[in-house]
Amino acid sequence: MLTNNLIMKRVLILKLFFFIVSFSVYSQGNTEYTGGYKIKFNEDGSKYLRIIAWGQFWAQYNDNVSDNTAKLNFGVRRARILTFTQLNKKFLILTHFGLNSLSGGNQHPIGAGDRSQLFFHGFWGEWKLSDQISAGAGLHYWNGISRLNNQSTLNMLTLDNNRESWATIGLSDQFARHIGVYVKGKLGKLQYRFAVNEAGSSTLDNRDPGVDNTTVYGGRRILGSADAGKVFQGYVDYNFLDQESNFLPYKVGTYIGSKKVFNIGAGFFNHPNGVVQADGQGDDVSIFAFDAFYDAPIGSNGSAITAYGVFQSNDYGENYNFGPYATGNMIYSHVGYLIPGQKDKTRFQPYVSYQNRSIDAINDNYNRFGIGANVFMTGHHSKLTLEYANSKVGNADSAGVITLQAMIYL
């Protein structure tokens, strides 16, 4: 049963959300977004520097915390700057840096803390080999597995990406980015991306397999770079309707009715000897997925639907279980509906999401249900998202979280 105090707190959050929405609707109105900040080095704009900046700001209420922990907290979910430059159509250089999840609990007095520092999310160069094929090298985001493992954080349908779809964050990479080489391109309506990368030796999983008597994701750290130094990944998708851009690796979450897209895809990730078992022997990490994405307007009244579904098989070694990473299978889906309205006015998009993930190590399942809504003041460039998420492992108590996000990107 909900206590009166809890009910009042949730009502206050909802009132705050709708107050902000109503203020935006009756303010001076939306301004047209005309392509962002782009520095042109010649008259036709073929030589340029493009700059993108965005921020996502959270107010989160969590009733499942200890008595000495605040239940309502504020934070900066993402603060990012991305630039890319082409002085010639034959090559491109991209730089992406920022910070994540800055809160009162991890700030540093002079900005020197691990989580409060800026770091590179990407830095790569790319060369055009032909009209259909390009190759690149560096710290890159041309990932495998699924569409959500290549998700852009600028235009997600849900409040945030499905966490378990970023299946290697902190285990073999630097925040979902590897150092390596890649190729990407198109064959008719088929798009592809493949990469060979270095595995990181410093990972979130710093356990000792012998001491902890468990499988540990630390192959390169324990076995060395010769045996566990490389990872291989790829993703292909077939574009049945409108063709999506693959100029950059970031997959769109929802087009808000501006395109008609239907894609099916498949991808993989393989890390030979990526994990080490309790007996000291290496074992391969193998992840693959199949997914489908549909995004299209409905009729002529401005409404649209966005739908996505994925099946993902996660093999991190026998009985691996570490935070959001576990050997087992996962099914995830989400559906959103853009309510009819004019494109240059405030728009509303309610959505639902669901995840079911098996955890072989404990012979049980993890379930997560989310329900929320986006309020677009100027498309994805200025929006609010309110979401309630409830998660549960097996017969344990469920945990519910309410999050309000304000986002701006230019």
Image: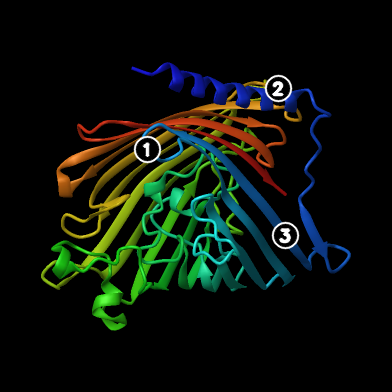
Q: Mark number for residue 65?
A: 1
Query: 303 above or below 49?
Result: above
Q: Mark 2 against mark 1, which lies toward the viewer?
A: 1
Q: Secondary structure at mark 1?
A: loop
Query: Tag 3: residue type?
Result: Ile
For this rendering, which residue is in front, 219 or 128? 219
Farthest left residue in view: 279
Nearer the N terminus, badge 3 or badge 1? 3
Estimate the x, y position of residue 191 in percent, counting from the top left. Answer: 50, 56
**Is residue 88 visible in the rendered structure shown here?**
no
In space, the residues marked 2 and 3 are separated at their CA atoms by 31 Å
The residue labelled by disc 2 is 22
For this rendering, which residue is in front, 42 or 36? 36
**Is residue 212 visible in the rendered structure shown here?**
yes
Q: Is residue 31 left or right of residue 215?
A: right
Q: Secondary structure at mark 3?
A: strand
Estimate the x, y position of residue 226 in percent, counting from the top left. Answer: 29, 83
Q: Mark 3 against mark 1, which lies toward the viewer?
A: 1
Query: 5 above or below 128?
Result: above
Residue at 26% in and 31% down = 397
Cβ–Cβ under 8 Å for marks 3 and 1: no
Q: Mark number for residue 194?
A: none
Query: Tag 1: residue type?
Result: Val
Nearer the N terminus, badge 2 or badge 3? 2
Find residue 110 and report its image quarter.
bottom right
Q: Mark 2 against mark 3, which lies toward the viewer?
A: 2
Residue at 41% in and 72% down = 196
Cβ–Cβ under 8 Å for marks 2 and 3: no
Q: Is residue 195 left or right of residue 368?
A: right
The residue labelled by disc 3 is 51
Residue at 34% in and 61% down = 269
